[in-house]
Image: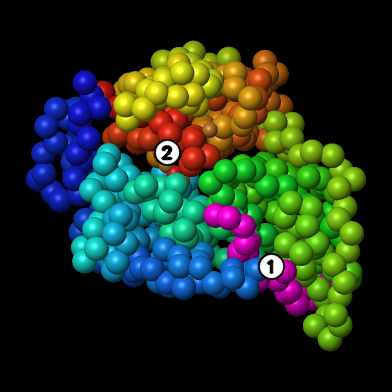
Amino acid sequence: GLLHASHLPGTEAGQEASGSPSISVADLAGPRDGEADRVFDLVAKQAEVKLSSGKAVQAWTYNGVIPGPELRMKLGELIEVRLVNEDIADGVTIHWHGLDVPNAEDGVAGATQDAVMPGESHTYRFRAEQVGTFWYHSHQHSKEAVEKGLFGMLIVEPPSTEDEPGEDITVATHVWEGGGLAIGDNDTLQRKIVAPGTPVKIRLLNTDNWTRKAHHVTGTSFRVTAIDGVELNKPGELRGTALYLTTGARYDLAFIMPDNPVYVSVNGSKKLGVLLAPDGGKDYEVPDIDGSGGLFDPSHYGEPADTPFGPDSVFDREFTMLLDNGLAFYNGVPGLYDTINGNVFPRTPMFVVKEGEVVKTTIINRSAVDHPMHLHGHHMLVLSRNGEVTTGSPWWSDTLDVLPGEVYEVAFLADNPGLWMDHCHNLVHAAAGMTMHLMYD
Ligand code: C2O
Ligand code: CU
């Protein structure tokens, strides 16, 4: 079957994949020629890293730090990232989570490239074609790699940021195996001095393998301006609203700094978050967390805007993903597994599409736990949840948290040929076979 095309697009021109579809490798790789506008060097290596608990751990890092270097780029730029693996024995790659790059640049070991082994290197090249908040992480033994620190943030800015003055703060929260929390620069509580009246943008990312995290903004009203790197249309003011970020998901928030301190908390903690204070001369107390605003609901937030397809469109393909838990064999080991359509990889379904098709997928969670479903290379427009059509701003997601009992209808345009992963971003589930492929015919 198609799964044997596991060495599909190599990045070296002229490398032919046996049994591959009628797509040429050149179409699937990013621009190989021409001088890059921005070059990043990432060295994967082990390093001792201090967690916020004070505990020192042996981490797997890009360039010796967790998170890895923040990669900032501008829309339209040609990006080159040179990855060197110094001493990660398992091998590494870089996957650009949420950034819809050409398939051969997607960084999935065993699917779009081979893992980069110690002493080896690999160069990624792609054009930054979406503005927004993304992240990158190794996609070789992802569960262990992400847990141990092989990830960082990736921000694509508009070509001109003159119209975006103010503070731009990234907040990536990561839980180390066995406890200990790292946030941003590894401090549990970050303090930032921000003058009243300053426009503030906060980019939230949950890098965890396992659980979703609650975020609260205390001390000001705010707007959620983007989900998974895609801007929302006319987002309204929120106050005290709980924002749950599933693993791998990103929310961008915006507010104008008031005269009082603002605290962005993680999991309701007064010790884990970012405290923005208008005056560095004072030692502000962390305020009590404001959770008065209920749960954030992206399906009824903001105002409608045109989308290329909607709930009433005629779809070229319709698929169903039934998420459940049951008896299966994974790597020959029988057990209770989190399953897609009754099975685990590689007996999960392979969705086959043609370029240009509009594809609808119904995702049903019949299990007792949530499954953040991540589709590579595409963004999914959420059409409905539990039979209720979304009414707010168009809501595009690349990592959709599907809670127990929920049913989502999503749709995407098949505009990025290749072999793509579609998996649960609870990476513990993914590592136990809750993964499948989307394949272009
Ligand atoms: Cu962020 Cu396939 O992963
Ligand atoms: Cu899952």
For numbered disc 1, what is the local secondary structure? loop
* Residue at position x 49%, y 54% in the image: 147
Residue appearing at x 87%, y 43% in the figure:
293
Left or right: residue 118 versus residue 138 is: left
Q: What is the C-alpha distance between the residues marked 1 and 2?
A: 29 Å
Check residue 132 for magenta coloring.
Answer: no
The residue most toward the front is 334
Q: Which part of the image, by quadrant, shows the N terminus?
A: top left
Residue 258 location (% of width, % of height): 86, 66
Q: Which residues are magenta?
A: 177-196
Which residue is tagged 2?
431
Residue beneath the point at 46% across and 53% down: 146
**Left-right relation of 42 to 372:** left
One can see residue 126 in this view? no
Which quadrant of the structure image shows residue 435? top left
Going by the numbered disc 1, the residue's amino acid type is Thr
Disc 1 marks which residue? 188
Residue count near mark 1 (Cα–Cα under 10 Å), binned few <14, some 14–19, many ≥20: many
Can residue 376 be seen here? The reply is yes
